[in-house]
């Protein structure tokens, strides 16, 4: 059985968040298709305010209006992403229950090119991101191709890691960390705010590791090579590596997500220890 295939093999149960509703939304500009869960609505806001609190990358773009049909590959991707999302719910529902709390499940929005969110307009260039204001995860359908072709991180578990990272931001929102970080940034210099963002992002990486730890221990869905794929993805989207690729040099003070080494280390920490306490990046002496 292919890696992570057990997720998809769970059938209707793993897709309990769904049915996903496929709708083509019209905008003026470039053609986009938005794959929605039931109940999606439009909001206005400033996406840039929150990207440091939830996105893997940065940028912004406009939207449009032409119909674009889904490919078979996209439909399969939707099923896989939905399965991973539902499996993260299995983990976090149980972890919250053990802590005497209730886990509020996020919604997943899949889109092409541009999408309106409660944090403002998001684009494919942003990469996957989480909006704290509407508690939804946004994922452009083309990102996983880019993860493989541009960043050299192929594989199902590499994709699962990306999703689990964004769910990590949702967990931060539920337990109050996102609000504290957002408030603290208002009184900080840009460099200091960037350093705080790095701590938040590395914690989300650690939370992704917690999910992997629980999925492996409780449901045995991981196979040989899966963890290596996740580590490769964490390394591929480190600030140092992305900056080196984009402009040939690295500026550590501008990091907002952490270096490749840091991202791998904190994902590994969550994977090995499997507890929220282990993921306290904010008081860690060394990141």
Image (spheres, rainbow, N blue to C red):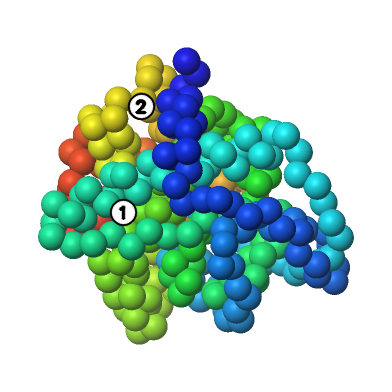
Residue 243: x %, y % from top left:
57, 49
Residue 5: x %, y % from top left:
48, 25
Q: In this view, does 110 lie to the left or right of 287?
A: right
**Considering only vertical position in the picture, is 27 above or below 247?**
below
Which residue bears the numbered disc 1?
A: 203
Residue 63: x %, y % from top left:
77, 67
Few, some or many C-alpha atoms within 10 Å of disc 2 (few <14, some 14-19, many ≥20)? some
Which residue bears the numbered disc 2?
A: 221
Disc assigned to residue 228: none
Q: What is the distance, in whole Å, between disc 1 and disc 2 at their CAs?
A: 23 Å
Q: Is residue 171 left or right of residue 161?
A: left
- Is residue 84 visible in the rendered image? The answer is no
Q: Residue at x 76, y 38 (%)?
A: 71
**Considering only vertical position in the picture, is 45 above or below 130?**
below
Residue 129: x %, y % from top left:
52, 58
- For discs 1 and 2, the disc positioned in front in the rendered view: 2
Q: Residue at x 27, y 52 (%)?
A: 93
- Is residue 81 visible in the rendered image? The answer is yes
Q: Is residue 237 left or right of residue 219?
A: right
Foreground pick, 225 / 254 = 225
Q: Which residue is drawn at 58% across and 52% down?
A: 20
For numbered disc 2, what is the local secondary structure?
loop
């Amino acid at each position: 059985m292919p890696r992570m295939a057990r997720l998809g093999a769970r059938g209707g149960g793993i897709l309990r968040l769904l049915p996903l509703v496929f709708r083509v939304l019209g905008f003026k500009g470039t053609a986009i298709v938005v794959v929605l869960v039931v109940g999606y609505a439009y909001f206005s806001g400033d996406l840039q305010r929150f990207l440091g609190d939830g996105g893997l990358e940065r940028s912004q773009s406009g939207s449009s209006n032409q119909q674009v049909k889904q490919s078979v590959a996209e439909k399969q991707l939707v099923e896989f992403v939905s399965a991973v999302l539902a499996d993260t719910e299995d983990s976090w529902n149980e972890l919250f229950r053990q802590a005497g709390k209730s886990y509020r499940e996020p919604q997943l929005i899949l889109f092409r090119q541009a999408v309106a969110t409660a944090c403002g307009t998001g684009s494919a260039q942003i990469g996957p991101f989480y909006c704290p204001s509407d508690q939804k995860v946004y994922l452009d359908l083309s990102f996983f191709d880019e993860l493989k072709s541009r960043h050299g991180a192929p594989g199902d578990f590499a994709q699962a890691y990306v999703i689990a990272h964004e769910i990590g931001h949702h967990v931060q929102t539920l337990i109050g960390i996102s609000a504290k970080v957002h408030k603290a940034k208002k009184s900080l210099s840009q460099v200091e705010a960037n350093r705080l963002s790095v701590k938040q992002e590395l914690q989300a990486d650690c939370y992704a590791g917690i999910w992997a730890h629980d999925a492996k221990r409780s449901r045995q869905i991981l196979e040989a090579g899966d963890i290596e794929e996740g580590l490769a993805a964490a390394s591929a989207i480190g600030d140092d590596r992305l900056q080196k690729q984009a402009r040939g040099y690295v500026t550590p003070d501008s990091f907002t997500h952490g270096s490749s080494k840091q991202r791998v280390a904190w994902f590994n920490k969550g994977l090995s220890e499997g507890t929220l306490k282990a993921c306290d990046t904010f008081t860690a002496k060394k990141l």
